[in-house]
């Protein structure tokens, strides 16, 4: 990039792309992969997610994020369905992954006993 | 030939409930539809028994995905076959929906843990993918660097940081803008900017989490800092024990380079900046700026006397500016939102927010960012959720091995740099270890001092010898051999070490001892005078245990739990404790079913 304007243009394009992906596109599964998450077993959760997606041949985007501060509740996993709010699940075990994928990712029902928070649009 | 492996199974419920709502007909129409699309060899229709969900019937489940359709009518089948089975698109409107709505899940702002937090530095942590620069740019990343480099002079950048009132987040709280100005004013053909990521306090993980969760924010803060002081080269000094943070930083630096945000002529501004990572071996003293620079130069990590200050003669003798990770993390926000937006948060002399790592006997272990001026009670009880198992709060240790222990009486203290200093603690880098009443304060002081003692580089005598002598005294107090006058000696030694050490490692090492001596002197005295550890932590305290022969039933439980096999005897007769071996741990007394064991 050669100027601030180019950066701003890139940002707008990226924001549009993300908004488009969010409203019509794929479901996103985001796993907390900071050191605290990994120490609490996030890698096993990640593998369980990938396995479940493979077995069910789902078209889902799996990505990662850093520590959000609730180290006590790691491993954390967020599910964001297109056009819906991002929901955070916590204190997960590998067995919980199957339930979250079947009930939330596929059937669109939040697994209320595992959910701990949701991101509000534009919120902190 | 008929295929025996199907790519998909469709389960149609033919339990009585679903049959009565029309599922038999459903199966027939479905079979017809599949044949129409020549899918009969790929998709198998199976009748199943009742799912117990008759109210939602007729029910259909499509595997392998596990999609659960309810209230399916024959008219819906064409859509299910064409959309889902043929094209793989789930028919949303037929999905089973629980009455539960998103609103029934609390939003992040409504959770106690986040309610009182104010996340500036940590705004993106846990939200964006730290390995993807595009996500950082999409949330407004590098705008501040662009603005500073192309629309502001370096003096204007410094003025903005000064007006914001940003102070060093590494612990000492030196005004960042002033530090930048000092380095800027030194004439030189070459200047360096260093990010101190040598986080070493026990129980502290703020910098690590920030670098792992949002590495681009630090890089952006450094670009702005380098522009302000006129440096074209920078280092991030980070300990090798942080492999994930290093990996993500390396990735982030590479991505920033590829987009022209690092390197030559950044964003067409004519400003060049190269950034390197220097891995440290994890010596605590290398968090001290002059030792850190020696380590980058390839020398042994030892501090040197100041002046000259790094702003005059730093890395390789050139003017150098060193800031902590979190300090840089605040910079993009200030440039983007202006000094007023930042200095409206906090207290008179301490502006903005501070990140703390909350650990110890607390319910919500984690990373919090709070406005300066918040009380310890709010952090520990409202955000941290109180102590484990509802235990009683005894003290909180702030500032790691350089800080002090704060007792319950001071829980309502509004925390900022000055208030903590006044009570003998310090802000430090942000470690906050919460302790309950099962903690022995003498033992805690000994732990922190043994840490600084073994991390002392040995260059100056007060720190090298003084901490060792202090530790010897604490060791003997903890093992029940404390003497009259030990506490006065500890205070005298401690104050001398603080005044005469070469660097702040020694200059702050006695703090945990001095602050616990100040607030918990009775515990020290109990150890020395009564030979008793009030929290029952220190082994070898007090008198040895003895077995009352009249009460003993000869069960042998005591002998089994004794960790050093000091108890002997025969079953059903009487047992004896060897007084020379007994370490007074009390395990036998706790186990004895008839209460025959007590301290003699």
Image: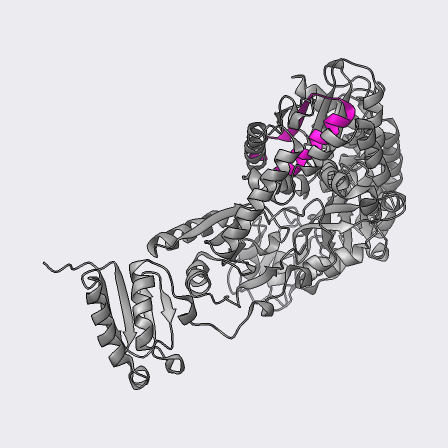
Q: Is residue B248 left or right of residue B151?
A: left
Q: Is residue B70 left or right of residue B381?
A: left
Q: Image quadrant of residue B398?
A: top right
Q: Is residue B6 left or right of residue B361?
A: left
Give residue B234's position: percent from left, percent from top.
68, 24
B233 is within the stretch colored magenta: yes
Q: Is residue B86 visible?
A: yes
Residue located at (59% from left, 61% from top) = A118
B40 is within the stretch colored magenta: no
Q: Is residue B130 visible?
A: no
Q: Colour scheme of this structure image?
A: one colour
Bounds of the magenta span? B216-243
Residue located at (78% from left, 24% from top) = B229
Q: Image quadrant of residue B421?
A: top right
Nearest to the observer: residue B553 or residue B303: B303
Nearest to the observer: residue A55 or residue B473: A55
- B297 over B536 or under it: above or below: above
Nearest to the observer: residue A98 or residue B15: B15
Give residue B571's position: percent from left, percent from top.
50, 62
Nearest to the observer: residue A86 or residue B278: A86
- B286 over B308 or under it: above or below: below
């Amino acid at each position: 990039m050669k100027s601030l304007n180019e950066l701003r243009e890139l940002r707008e394009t990226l924001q549009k792309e993300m908004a488009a992906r969010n409203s019509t596109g794929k479901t996103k599964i985001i796993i907390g992969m900071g050191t605290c998450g990994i120490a609490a077993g996030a890698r096993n959760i990640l593998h369980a997610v990938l396995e479940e997606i493979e077995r069910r041949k789902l078209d889902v985007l799996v990505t990662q994020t850093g520590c959000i501060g609730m180290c006590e509740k790691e491993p954390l996993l967020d599910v964001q369905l297109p056009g819906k709010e991002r929901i955070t699940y916590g204190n997960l075990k590998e067995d919980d992954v199957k339930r979250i994928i079947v009930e939330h990712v596929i059937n669109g029902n939040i697994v209320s006993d595992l959910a701990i928070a949701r991101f509000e649009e534009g919120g902190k | 030939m008929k295929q025996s492996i199907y790519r998909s199974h469709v389960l149609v419920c033919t339990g009585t409930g679903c049959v009565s709502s029309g599922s038999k007909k459903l199966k027939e129409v479905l079979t017809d539809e599949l044949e129409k699309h020549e899918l009969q060899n790929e998709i198998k229709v199976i009748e199943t028994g009742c799912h117990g969900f008759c109210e939602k019937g007729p029910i259909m489940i499509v595997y392998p995905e596990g999609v659960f359709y309810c209230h399916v009518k024959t008219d819906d089948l064409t859509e299910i076959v064409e959309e889902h089975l043929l094209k793989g698109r789930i028919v949303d409107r037929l999905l089973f929906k629980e009455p539960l709505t998103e609103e029934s899940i609390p939003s992040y702002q409504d959770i106690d843990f986040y309610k009182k937090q104010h996340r500036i530095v940590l705004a993106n942590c846990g939200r964006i993918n730290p390995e993807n620069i595009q996500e950082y740019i999409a949330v407004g990343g590098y705008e501040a660097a662009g603005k500073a480099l192309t629309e502001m002079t370096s003096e204007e950048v410094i003025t903005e940081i000064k007006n914001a009132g940003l102070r060093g987040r590494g612990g000492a709280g030196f005004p960042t803008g002033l530090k930048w100005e000092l380095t800027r004013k030194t004439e030189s053909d070459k200047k360096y900017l260093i990010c101190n990521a040598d986080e070493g306090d026990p129980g502290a993980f703020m910098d690590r989490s920030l670098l792992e969760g949002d590495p681009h924010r630090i890089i952006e803060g450094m670009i702005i800092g380098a522009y302000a002081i006129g440096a074209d080269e920078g280092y991030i000094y980070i300990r090798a024990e942080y492999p994930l943070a290093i990996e993500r930083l390396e990735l982030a630096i590479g991505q920033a380079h590829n987009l022209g945000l690092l390197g030559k002529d950044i964003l067409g501004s004519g400003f060049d900046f190269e950034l390197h990572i220097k891995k440290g071996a994890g010596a605590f003293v290398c968090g001290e700026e002059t030792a850190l620079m020696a380590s980058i130069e390839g020398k042994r990590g030892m501090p040197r006397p100041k002046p000259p200050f790094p702003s005059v003669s730093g890395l390789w003798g050139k003017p150098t500016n060193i800031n902590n990770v979190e300090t840089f993390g605040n910079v993009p926000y200030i440039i983007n939102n202006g000094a007023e937006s930042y200095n409206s948060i906090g207290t008179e002399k301490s502006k903005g927010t501070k990140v703390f790592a909350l650990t110890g006997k607390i319910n919500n272990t984690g990373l919090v960012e709070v406005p300066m001026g918040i009380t310890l009670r709010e952090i520990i009880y409202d955000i941290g959720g109180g102590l484990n198992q509802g235990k009683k709060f005894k003290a909180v240790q702030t500032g790691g091995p350089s800080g002090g222990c704060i007792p319950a009486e001071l829980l309502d203290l509004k925390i900022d740099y000055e208030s903590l200093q006044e009570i003998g603690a310090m802000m430090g880098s942000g470690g906050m270890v919460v302790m309950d009443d099962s903690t022995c304060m003498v033992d805690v002081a000994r732990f922190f001092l043994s840490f600084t003692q073994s991390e002392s580089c040995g260059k100056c005598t007060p720190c090298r010898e003084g901490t060792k002598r202090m530790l010897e005294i604490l060791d003997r107090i903890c093992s029940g051999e404390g003497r009259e006058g030990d506490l006065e000696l500890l205070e005298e030694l401690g104050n001398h070490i603080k005044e005469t050490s070469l660097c702040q490692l020694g200059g702050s090492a006695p703090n945990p001892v001095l602050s616990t001596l100040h607030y918990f002197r009775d515990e020290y005295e109990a150890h020395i005078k009564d030979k008793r550890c009030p929290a029952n932590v220190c082994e070898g305290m007090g008198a040895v245990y003895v077995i009352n022969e009249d009460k003993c039933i000869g069960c042998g439980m005591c002998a089994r739990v004794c960790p050093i096999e000091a108890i002997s005897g025969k079953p059903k007769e009487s047992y004896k404790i060897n007084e020379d071996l007994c370490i007074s741990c009390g395990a036998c007394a706790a186990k004895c079913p008839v209460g025959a064991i007590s301290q003699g």
